[in-house]
Every structure is written in structure tokens, then in C-alpha cells.
Image (cartoon, helix red, strand yellow):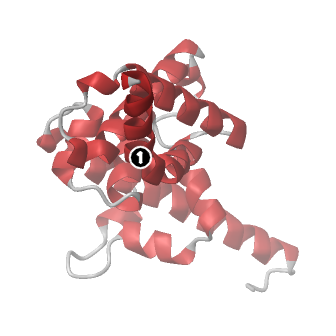
């Protein structure tokens, strides 16, 4: 009887967050199937550790923390770190020329990209930057919540977010530049 009640309570607390958990996993995964596996594994771990949940108000942050551990475990297990794109430098002249009062390169690049281009660029970021950018800029968590989910200090969240945004903007700018050059060469030197 107690187990059935506990299952009902778990279901009631986690059901509203399952779609958002899947969306977070999908943004980090290379395929829908991997995202589904990560979400399912995170929910299984949450069920296993349900008795440890002390603050029922912070269920989403607790679930994201578990999901983050599942993703990190899977990434380590499959040695994906070796396959990540090389670290990009932020010494790009375009990035250095931006005035503080104008929209930064991150905002400019995001505004000009399609969702697919944007998500491909996000997936190309190294894990530690991608996770912070996704949780803060896509999921809308505050610095403290991101720090709790990732088990890092708030200052580390801010520095990784800043660096992650710059790397993302650089990737998006390079994608835009490459697309512009390809369009120019396809149309006989006339920009489209």
C-alpha cells in the first residue's frame, strides 16, 4: 500500500517535468533515441532515489541534476570527449570589435540563424560550456539553479556561460560566413 502511494506521489511530482526533461536531453543528444534513453534513465534513477528528495518545490532542478549526471556518465562511457571539435579561440577580430552598448556577437549571431543551425552549433560546444548555455539561455534557469544542477559554483557558471556564449557566437558567425561565401560562388560572384 505504501509503495503504491509513493508511486502515485512520484508520478504526480515528475509528470509535469517529463517533456521539459526530454527537451533538455534532446538538445544535448545526437539523436532522439539517445535523448529518450537519457530521460528514461534519469527517471529510473529519480525513482530509485525518490526518498532522498527533501524539497518538493525544487523537483525540476532535482530531475535536471539527475539528468545531467546520466548524460555525463554516458558521455564518459562512450569516450565522446575525444570526438569533440577542437577548442576555438575567442581572439576573433570580429568579437573584439563589438562595442559594449551594441548587441553582442552572441545576440547578433543567434538572431540571424535558423533553429537547426543554432542547435548544431550548440551541440558542437564542449560539454561544460554546452550544459551551462542550455540550462541558462534555453531553459531559463538562474545562475544559482544552474550551479546546483551542475554541482559547480555560481562564479564558475558565470565564467562558463560567458565563454560558452563567445564560442557559440564564433561558431555561428563562421557558419554564416561560410554560407555567404557558398551563396556568392554559386551565383557567379553576386551575393544573394
Q: Is residue 73 or residue 104 the one in the foreground? A: 73
Say if 77 sits above or below 141 in the image: above
Q: Is residue 100 or residue 152 the one in the foreground? A: 152
Which of the image's four quarters has the C terminus?
bottom right
Q: Residue at x 37, y 30 (%)?
A: 6
Say if 113 sits above or below 13 in the image: below
Q: Residue at x 54, y 26 (%)?
A: 41
Q: Residue at x 55, y 76 (%)?
A: 112
Q: Position of residue 139 (x, y in %)?
A: 39, 57
Q: Residue at x 57, y 16 (%)?
A: 79
Q: Count neighbours of disc 1 (C-alpha within 10 A) and say few if under 14, some if 14 to 19, many if 20 or more.
A: few
Say if 76 sits above or below 11 in the image: above
Can residue 89 be seen here? The reply is no
Tell me if 36 is positioned left or right of 19 in this view: right
Say if 139 sits above or below 187 in the image: above
Q: Position of residue 50 (x, y in %)?
A: 33, 26
Q: Position of residue 43 (x, y in %)?
A: 48, 32
Which of the image's four quarters has the N terminus?
top left
Q: Is residue 178 or residue 11 the one in the foreground? A: 11
Q: Is residue 155 or residue 148 the one in the foreground? A: 148
Tell me if 77 is positioned left or right of 142 in this view: right
- How many dots with numbers? 1
Secondary structure beneath label 1: helix
Which residue is most to the top?
Answer: 77
Which quarter of the figure has residue 63?
top left
According to the picture, the residue beneath numbered tag 1 turns out to be 12
Q: Position of residue 109 (x, y in %)?
A: 48, 70
Can residue 153 be seen here? The reply is yes
Amino acid at each position: 500500500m505504501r509503495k503504491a502511494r509513493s508511486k502515485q506521489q512520484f508520478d504526480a511530482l515528475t509528470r509535469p517535468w517529463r517533456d521539459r526533461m526530454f527537451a533538455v536531453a534532446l538538445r544535448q543528444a545526437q539523436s532522439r533515441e539517445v535523448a529518450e534513453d537519457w530521460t528514461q534513465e534519469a527517471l529510473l534513477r529519480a525513482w530509485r532515489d525518490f526518498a532522498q528528495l527533501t524539497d518538493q518545490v525544487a523537483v525540476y532542478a532535482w530531475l535536471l541534476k539527475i539528468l545531467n549526471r546520466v548524460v555525463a556518465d554516458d558521455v564518459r562511457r562512450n569516450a565522446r570527449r575525444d570526438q569533440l571539435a577542437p577548442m576555438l579561440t575567442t581572439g576573433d577580430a570580429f568579437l573584439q570589435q563589438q562595442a559594449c552598448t551594441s548587441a553582442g556577437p552572441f545576440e547578433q549571431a543567434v538572431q540571424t540563424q535558423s533553429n537547426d543551425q543554432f542547435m548544431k552549433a550548440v551541440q558542437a560546444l564542449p560539454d561544460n560550456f554546452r550544459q551551462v548555455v542550455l540550462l541558462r539561455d534555453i531553459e531559463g534557469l538562474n545562475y544559482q539553479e544552474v550551479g546546483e544542477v551542475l554541482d559547480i559554483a555560481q562564479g564558475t557558471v558565470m565564467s562558463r556561460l560567458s565563454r560558452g556564449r563567445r564560442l557559440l557566437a564564433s561558431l555561428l558567425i563562421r557558419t554564416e560566413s561560410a554560407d555567404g561565401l557558398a551563396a556568392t560562388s554559386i551565383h557567379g560572384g553576386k551575393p544573394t
